[in-house]
Image (cartoon, rainbow, N blue to C red):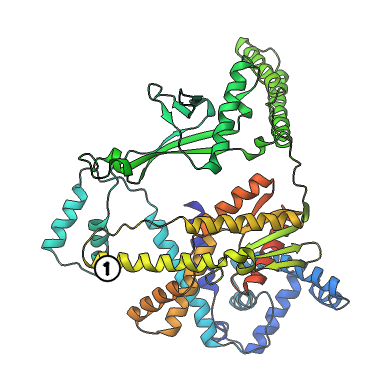
Amino acid sequence: MKRSQYQLEGKTRWLEMLRSDAELLEASGVALDSLRIKANEILAQFSPQSAPVEAKQKKGKTGKKTRKSQNSDNNRSLSATLFQAYRDTEDNLTRCAISYLLKNGCKVSDKEEDPEKFAQRRRKIEIQIERKREQLEARIPKGRDLTDTTWLETLFLATHQVPNNEAQAKSWQNSLLRQSSSVPFPVAYETNSDMTWFKNHKGRICVKFNGLSEHTFEVYCDQRYLHWFQRFLEDQQIKHESKNQHSSSLFTLRSGRIAWLEGEDKGVRGSAAAGAPWNIHRLSLYCCVDTRLWTDEGTELVRQEKAEEIAKTITKTKEKGDLNEKQLAHIKRKNSTLARINNPFPRPSKPLHKGQSHVLVGVSLGLEKPATVAVVDATTGKVLTYRSIKQLLGDNYKLLNRQQKQKHSLSHKRQIAQTLAAPNRFGESELGQYVDRLLAKEIVAIAQAYSAGSIVVPKLGDMREQVNSEIQAKAEQKCPECLEAQKNYAKQYRHSVHQWSYGRLISSICSSAAQAGIVIEEGKQPIRGSPHNKAKELAIAAYHSRKNS
């Protein structure tokens, strides 16, 4: 919420500063040439070395690319300086000149401004501000209407009154159509010691939970997940057989959560009790693991981190002097834990990924092309290779079109069901999730092939804002002065391009990278440019941000 509020305040300030050339000339009371002269003076004041840098860029291709990446970093710092100078100054001409520089990318433009392009650019910012405000209002916590009191009150209002405006009618409709959940809240187990693993007489892996110890749960999972549960069982058995000579802090399992999910049980379908919540829902277990603890080399890294942390705690406690009984007991427990940590669990050996810190894999996300990859050598700014969505998927590219057709089909069925006031909650296949895993696997393979030190993904919040503002701005440009036509155009445009769950894709990339030992970095994806250039600039920006920090 705080991050969104900061973004809203920043975008609002930028909208106040963003004015056309005609508006700037009217506000400053000078001609365009005079405004450009003043802008050049300000630019020389805050970046006196800009001219020599441009001269050096002409020497060669390699030097040019290096200077280009440096200039990109310098422009960001220069923008921050200009924003601060705008807030500090009271001179109207100086403010207008700074606004002129900022809207032109910290440069003095010698071209005439296109009014239509500027209007579209300003409208994008206005849309982002409107959406950010709506998001902040929508994120206010809302309780569950367990007694349907709110629903009945809204129904009474809707049948006895006429809505004052379209927004009120929409809120009534949302309240009446909203289905409150009838299943319990999930239960989180924050430590791995809250779960006990064992095998029953059938040889199936089972689990018990603290607080529910009288209940035994059998684990049913796909074959690709079975080895994780076997590892959880092995870790616990090794600890018990060694009489607690191993530490549970080195368990592969870190925490768990149980939750009810919708899903009809085929075994009871058609029976009298089929409609009961415990028959139409299934109990699911989510496990959080530390993938580094899967191998001997990764376990050694975790052991060293924890051992250093414990040693620092013991040292700080001893430095206090004149320790009481509680402090002495605390040091004794820490020494005991340190001894157990130095006795790690047996793990299979697998060499760790050794990447070069200056080689980064940038992943740009977009509407028509869900993912585009660029492998960049950030020291020279050279792109080692590009990968489009078609190259990433290869022979599986046809699955992308199949998933798109499934979405269209389900959307059509949902629309028909809503028209007939019939149940419209159609489930979707896991094809999209499968394609995400294929993309993540290929991206990680590319990072390993080029010995990349990290994979850079866009910040999801910024991505959503860019996509929605781009669609809305296009709709307003195509259908001016007609809100209904704009909504229809935006809806059709969304259906014409690949709809994708960017959060799910980023989560798959992070999961695959963590298993391979590759670092994940986040950055702000550029608004303009082709998908290839966005991926390249994203990687370079992340590298310079890392160096500066």
Residue lying furthest top = 325
Q: In this view, does 330 lie above or below 2?
A: above
**Position in image of residue 262 (x %, y %):** 34, 46
Residue placed at 45% from the left, 75% from the top?
Answer: 496
Q: Is 352 in front, or is 166?
A: 352
Q: Which of 143 and 428 is in front in this view?
A: 428
Q: Mark 1 points at which residue?
A: 416
Which residue sits furthest right?
Answer: 59
Considering the numbered disc 1 on the image, is that residue within a helix, a strand or a loop? helix
Q: Which residue is drawn at 63% across and 11% down?
A: 324
Q: Based on the displayed image, in which of its 4 quarters is residue 543 positioned? A: bottom right
- Provide residue 425's location: percent of width, then percent of height: 31, 57
Residue type at mark 1: give it.
Ile
Residue lying at 72% horizontally and 79% vertically, measured from the top left = 40
Image-based side of 55 in relation to 422, left or right: right
State which quadrant residue 296 falls in: top right
Mark 1: few/some/many CA within 10 Å (<14, 14-19, 20+): few
Place of residue 421 in the rendered image (x, y in percent of width and height, measured from the top left): 21, 63
| Residue 512: x %, y % from top left | 62, 49
Q: From the viewer's perspective, is 320 left or right of 121?
A: right
**344, above or below 131, in the image:** above
Q: Which residue lies furthest to the left in this view?
A: 160
With respect to residue 352, does 314 lie above or below? above
Q: Can residue 88 be seen in this view?
A: no
Q: Quadrant of residue 28?
A: bottom right
In-image side of 482 versus 454 (left or right): left
Q: Nearer the viewer, residue 378 or 439?
A: 439
Q: How many marks?
A: 1
Can I make out residue 414 in this image?
A: yes
